[in-house]
Image (spheres, grey):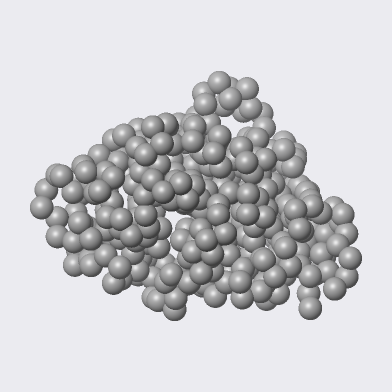
Amino acid sequence: MNSVPTNAAPRTLRELRDGIEAGRHTGAQVYAAVDGRTVVDRALGEARPGVPMRTSTIVEWASATKPVTCVALMRLVDTGLLGLDDPVHKHLPEFTATGDFPGKNEVTVRRLLTHTAGLTSTLTGVEPPERMVADICASPLAPGWRPGQRSAYNSVAMWIVAALVARLSGRRFGDFVRTEVFGPAGVEEAWIGMPDEEYDARWDDLAVIDGFPRSGTRDWVTWERPTGGCHGPIRELGRFYAAFLAGRLCSPGAVAEMTRPQVAGVYDEYVHATVDRGLGFLLRSSYAGHGYGPHASPDTYGHGGRNWCVGLADPACGLAAAVYWNGMADDDVQAVRQPATLAALYADLGLVT
C-alpha cells in the first residue's frame, strides 16, 4: 500500500470538477482521515452564485444525519438506560396510548434503528419536535405492517429515536448531540437544529442547493430534525466517522452491534432495492446509489444524505471520509457520481490493493 498523501487527491478533485462542468453540482467538499489523521480537506466551486465553496462552508447533511441520531441513542444503551429489544412503549408510554393500532406494541428500539418498524405520520411540513412525536405516536403502522418482518426506509422513526434520547437523558435532543456525541468526536461546527443566533451569524457561510427551495432557509436550518437536519461543513461528518471508528463514541460491543448486518439481502419497499443495514448504518453491499465504490472493503459502513452527500468508515484501512456535492441529482446520476468519487478518493490515498 502506498503512503497516504496529505491534502492532495488530484483524481478526486478532477472527478468533482468534471461534475461541475457537466452541471451536476456547483461546488463540492471532500474530507478524509486515515487512522485518525486528516489527509484530505478540500473544497471547490461555488456554495451559491458568486460565493466560493470553502472547507468551512456549512452544508446540509440530510439523511446522513441518521447515524448521528442513532449513535446518540446507543450512548444511552451503553449506560444501561434502555435495551435494543425493549418495546418502545416501555420508555415512551404515549407511543401506544392513543388508539388501538395493531402491531405497535411490537415495535422495539432495534426495529426503529433497522427501518423495520413501519411508523407513519400525517405531518409533512416544518413542525416542532413535540408535535411531530405526538403525531407519530397517534398514528397507525403502515397498512398490513408487522414490525421486524418487512423492511422500508422509515425516516419518521428517527423522531421516536430522538424522543427516547430526550426522555431518558432529560435534555433536548439537539443539546444532547452537541455535548454527548459531537463533543467527544471533536465536532465543533455542526448542529441538529442550528440556534437562531448562530444562523444570523453564519448566513454568509451557508451553502444553498439550486432547485431545493428550503435549502439554507431559517426554518429549515434551525429545525431540530433528527431525520436529516444536521448542518455543518462536511469535514465534521468525516470527523464523526473518525471518532466512531476509533471507539470514542460507543463501546466496542455497541460498535460491533451497529455495524453487523441486522437486515441482510432484504428488499426495501421504500427504496425499491435490496439493502443491508446495521443499526443506523447502510452496510457495504447496499444498493448502488448509496454504495461506497469498488475499492471499499466488505466491512465498510456509512449513510448517504438525499443524493448530495455521504459519510463512511472503512475499518480495513482506517478510513473515515465524507463528500458533499452542492447540487441535487436523481438516483441514476448519484449511482454513478458517488461510487466514482469514492473510487478516486481511495486511489488518491493509495488504498487500492
Point 31% across, 40% down: residue: 132
Point 43% across, 70% down: residue: 262
Seen as rendered, the residue at the extreme left is 100
Residue 173 in the image: state x and y as whole percent. 44, 36
Residue 115 shows up from this direction: yes
**34 horizontally vs 297: left or right:** right
Q: Observer-nearest residue: 3 or 88? A: 88
Residue 312 in the image: state x and y as whole percent. 62, 60
Q: Quadrant of residue 2?
A: bottom right
Identify whether 150 is placed above or below 42. Answer: below
Residue 11 in the image: state x and y as whole percent. 81, 64
Residue 194 in the image: state x and y as whole percent. 53, 31
Q: Observer-nearest residue: 302 or 304? A: 302
Identify whether 220 is placed above or below 42. Answer: above
Identify whether 147 is placed above or below 41. Answer: below
Point 59% across, 40% down: residue: 182
Q: Quadrant of the C terminus?
A: bottom right
Q: Quadrant of the N terminus?
A: bottom right
**95 horizontally vs 100: left or right:** right
Residue 49 shows up from this direction: no
Point 66% across, 29% down: residue: 204
The number of callouts visible is 0
**18 horizontally vs 278: left or right:** right
Identify whether 247 is placed above or below 151. Answer: above
